[in-house]
Image (tube, helix red, strand yellow):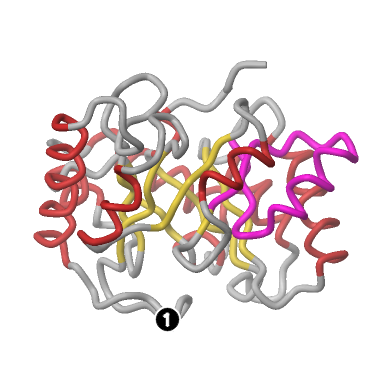
């Protein structure tokens, strides 16, 4: 089974956060975002019981199957249980304090998508020690302070983000077989996250971001489908 995921999916990346949906179901937010043309969704539910998170994942997968890549934040157990139940869930996104990427890759298999949060130069040393293709992309930020993740690192701003992307590329060029490269041999794409929203696409693309990861810009929108469609259009029309 080969990976269906494409780096192009990262352009507008929804982090569907259970605490940011203004009382609506996660699956309903995901359905609207996918209807708006978005192709990458991460489900994040830090405070939901595992049973409820699994149910939300299975329900969301019904909307993303064949249309968008769906990854689960942190919870490898939820990913495995959802796949066991037949849901079309595509992978996992890890933070720096979660299980090691190598161990998770072994658990989820070569076909699954694996993302990792990384924003500090020292974190690249650990990545460089991995085999190429262990991780598929990096979530990098925060660009700005954000209330949806109170333990975020110090904000990078766009200049700091661009410097981090340069470090990733330099490390990948210096060590072609290292974990700073994708399975296809390209430097890991970096998605900008943390306080980003409509109006940020041009700055993101100028800073070599592979995409924008948004939370409230879609989760809290009156019309998630329209918000997603507007973000996709903005990204496509932004000049590099």
Q: Where is residue 204 drawn, in percent x and y?
A: 21, 49
Depth order, front residue of 24/117:
117
Q: Is residue 86 above or below residue 185?
A: below
Q: Is residue 189 above or below residue 41?
A: above
Q: Is residue 229 above or below residue 195?
A: above
Residue range corresponding to the magenta coloring: 69-93
Q: Is 81 covered by the magenta stretch?
A: yes
Identify the residue shown where x is 12% and y is 36%. 240
List the residue tagged with mark 1: 151
Q: Where is residue 41 drawn, in percent x and y?
A: 57, 47
Q: Is residue 92 left or right of residue 60?
A: left
Depth order, front residue of 42/202:
42
Q: Is 120 covered by the magenta stretch?
A: no
**Number of numbered labels in the structure image:** 1
Q: Where is residue 202 drawn, in percent x and y?
A: 18, 47
Q: Is residue 143 left or right of residue 97?
A: left
Image quarter (top left, top right, bottom left or bottom right) of the N terminus:
top right
Depth order, front residue of 200/168:
168
**Direction front: furthest residue:** 129
Identify the residue shown where x is 31% and y is 68%. 142
Depth order, front residue of 149/75:
75
Identify the residue shown where x is 12% and y is 45%. 166
Identify the residue shown where x is 63% and y is 38%. 106
Q: Is residue 98 left or right of residue 134?
A: right
């Amino acid at each position: 089974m080969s990976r269906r995921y494409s780096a192009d999916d990262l352009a507008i990346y929804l982090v569907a956060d259970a605490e940011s949906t203004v009382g609506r179901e996660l699956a309903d937010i995901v359905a609207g975002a996918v209807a708006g043309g978005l192709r990458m969704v991460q489900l994040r539910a830090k405070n939901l019981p595992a049973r409820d998170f699994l149910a939300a994942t299975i329900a969301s997968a019904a909307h993303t199957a064949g249309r968008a890549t769906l990854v689960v934040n942190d919870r490898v157990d939820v990913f495995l249980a959802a796949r066991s139940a037949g849901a079309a869930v595509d992978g996992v996104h890890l933070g720096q304090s979660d299980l090691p990427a190598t161990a998770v890759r072994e658990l989820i298999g070569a076909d699954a998508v694996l993302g990792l949060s990384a924003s500090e130069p020292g974190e690249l040393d650990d990545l460089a020690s991995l085999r190429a293709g262990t991780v598929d992309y990096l979530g990098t930020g925060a660009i700005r302070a954000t209330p949806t993740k109170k333990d975020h690192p110090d904000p990078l701003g766009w200049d700091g983000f661009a410097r981090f992307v340069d470090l990733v590329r330099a490390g990948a060029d210096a060590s072609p077989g290292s974990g700073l490269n994708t399975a296809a041999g390209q430097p890991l794409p970096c998605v900008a996250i943390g306080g980003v929203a409509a109006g940020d696409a041009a700055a993101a693309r100028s800073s070599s971001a592979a995409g924008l990861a948004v939370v409230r810009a879609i989760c809290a929108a009156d019309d998630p489908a329209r918000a997603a469609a507007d973000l996709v259009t903005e990204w496509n029309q932004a000049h590099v």
